[in-house]
Image (cartoon, helix red, strand yellow):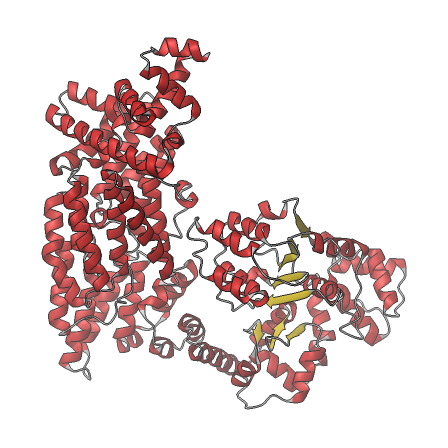
Amino acid sequence: MICAASKKDYYFSERIRRRMERIPSHRLTAVEAPSGFGKTTAVREYLSALSDGARVVWRTIGEENRLGEWEVLCRVVGEADPQCGNELGALAVPWDDECLPRMEAALAAMRHDGEVYLVVDNYQFVRSRIPERYLRAFYGALPEGVHLILVTQLVNPVPRAIVVDAQVNHIRREHLDFDTADIAAYYGQLGLRLTGEQAEGIRRFTGGWAAGVYLTALAYSEAGTLQAVNDVEALIRATVWDKLSGAERLFLLRLCNFGSFDLETSRFLNETDWIDKNILDMLERNGFVWHDMGERRYYVHSILQLYVKKEFDACSGAFRERVLRLTAQWHEKQGDNLLALRYYALIGDFRAALSLPLATSDFSSNASAENRALLLSVLDRCPPEIRAEFPRAMIVFAFALFIYNETERVMALASEVERNVAASVPMSDEEKHRLTGEIVFLTAFLAHNDFAAMAAGYKRAVELMGGPTSIINMKGPWTFGAPSILYMFYRSSAERDVQILEKNLPYYLAAARGHGTGADVVMRGELQLNRGDFEAAEITAHRAAYAAREAQQLNVELCAHFLLAQIALARGDTTEYRSAIGALREKARASKSVVHLNMLGLCEGFLGAEYGVGKVPEWLAEDDVTSRVRFMTRPYANVVYAKSLLDAKKYARLAGIGAELEKAAAFYPNAMARIYTGLHVAVAHEALGAAEEAERALRGALDIALPDGVILPLAQNFGALSPILKRLLAREFLNAAALKRISALAKVWSQNLQCARAALLGAAALLSEREREVAGLVARGLTNDEIARQMHVSVATVKSFLTRAFRKTGVASRAELAAWLLRWEN
């Protein structure tokens, strides 16, 4: 606890001392309490008293911090061991589960001499938290002698599952509270006498809050008597604010929107080339400001900052506007356009706000509820006549609205911009045509996923602009993160839809400087794969990968590698599979793009769910996709999620949400998602004994798939679908020729896939020990009753083992299972 006489005179209770002494025996210490409970002081003073051989790396996070949790952890490790920090920073955490073992290996090899303490203070300000399992793996992998300490407020606590871990030293408010005895002892340490009644009165007033106890002590020390104070704010005013000179108050008022600042920031906000020595002395002696001499930054305690903000709110309107303008200009100078936009919007200077060099990437790479609210607020509050002055900015805003799925707002804003451009007197005809072309280009996206309609807009846009658009980033993801072009643009007639893309993509490429090159070739290859023409698909996929790579279109190239991986599995070619999946992973991870890393997760999830190769990422299996995929890609994620539910035998859940999944797949529509969703839901209903619902769901999928020859999804799930297909055949909802085609492809696909899976995973890995035992008895010709008696289980259990064996091996009969087992045993 900071005392009245010196910042270095502290009081610590026995409770907090005991908890602090546990820090060296734990890899993680989490210190959690509201502001003003002395968290930072307690940790800093404890660590400063350790032996000279201990090294402390301290990173304080400011309120204006834009770093994610993973970036912060990498940086604090990097200060202790730069090589380890660089290795961690190169990992795609938390977007790629396969990074976990690499993260653990890097941390285990971290170089350090003696004890090292990595402290992250104000942890509540880290953004985009990593999943709990990553944080657990992070501190669990720290080498012996390296300790992580997280100091945070309860507004954004460390995950509950972490702090209750017996291996974690959890320091809470009750350890930092001052009880009556602590207050009396602290006052005595300062040479101030209290009666027991006075000490209890201070405890009741402050609630044991360390900052409150400190402020009452300051007031007592200065007045010579214990004053009756009704609130903490009055204490801060009397003991801190009123003691400051006018210049010192003005300095803090101008910086009230910064939780931390350096001298350059101070000079800019105070509109001076130098800072008076008296002000620097004030910062050094003030108990609510900490100077990090290593970073050369000052950190203001939130208690003081909140008080100064209240004083700021009471200042004249002209002063507040000047400070907020300077704050906006500072962020603009630092290249943080969104923060600058926020402060310009606060003062209502929309001309300055719309003059910012905002780009579509500012919004696409920082998509959040907070920035969406800012965008809508600016548009709602900005007068129409000012919006009319900045058509280029409004086009960028309209594209941002499209990202947030605000379709009606996009249309309204685009119409407004078009009217304003047409009515503009000072604007030349050439400029009017160009801006109108940009609007046409933007609104063409609203026709998604009807590429014929979209292309008409692109063609018209090029004619008006006289060249390519300036609002699209060539490096941006053409598929919005979807790993399949066929998924995106196959609406109702596969061949026609592929031809539409092949015919019309050049219009988009001309408008967007080649952005999306190779997409039409990928879509053609995907259709060939799904029709069972694996050889033609492979040739096409290689052509697509080459075209995309030459045009530096990574997003499309990743789609091509994903297609090659699927083709390789379908052909049983493990060499080609390893090459394709290796390229896919390497390129996605090297890009460090969140969109591409989430796209990789979708690819691996689909391969794990439909091909049984690899593990479905946890975020997909648990349907935690809202923050990871764009709305237009959600149905693809739903396909993986539905198959994960089937594999987990959560039939009731899948049957229950089936209608919503089908609705999402039909929104644009996405025919591939509709096919997979229909057959997955059918399997769930069949497992629940709801034959009629199963047939209805499968018929919906067949109505789309069969006319287009898109039968691979049916072949992939043939074992589970076979009973339903046979009933539909008997009732003449399915013709024998169609069933024969599906069955033939299922046999080829399952045989080739099992060859690949056995080579990749090992044949024994496909079936559990009990499943292999059942398969062996089936191969010997035993009936289910005979197998049940020999294994001492029920017939129902035997059937369950057989069902799982059928699904894992891709076979549909006892004879095929016996043949499969014979191949691998020989």
Q: Is residue 49 left or right of residue 128?
A: right
Q: For the N terminus, which image quadrant?
A: bottom right
Q: Quadrant of residue 740?
A: top left
647 w.r.t. 330: above or below? above
Please say whether residue 513 is visible from this viewpoint.
yes
Q: Give the camera-side residue of 558 and 380.
A: 558
Query: Residue at coordinates 56% horizontally, 80% vertically from top-left?
Result: 254
634 w.r.t. 550: above or below? above
Q: Is residue 48 left or right of residue 150?
A: right
Please say whether residue 231 is visible from this viewpoint.
no
Q: Residue at the far front: name it.
A: 826
Q: Is residue 205 left or right of residue 250?
A: right
304 w.r.t. 543: above or below? below
Query: Residue at coordinates 25% horizontally, 28% vertically from top-left?
Result: 718
Q: Quadrant of residue 142?
A: bottom right
Q: Residue at the far bottom: name it.
A: 273
Residue 766 at x, y percent in the picture: 37, 31
Q: Is residue 392 left or right of residue 378?
A: left
Q: For the C terminus, which image quadrant?
A: top left
Residue 280 at x, y percent in the picture: 66, 84
Residue 536 at x, y percent in the picture: 14, 45
Residue 205 at x, y percent in the picture: 76, 60
Q: How many marks?
A: 0
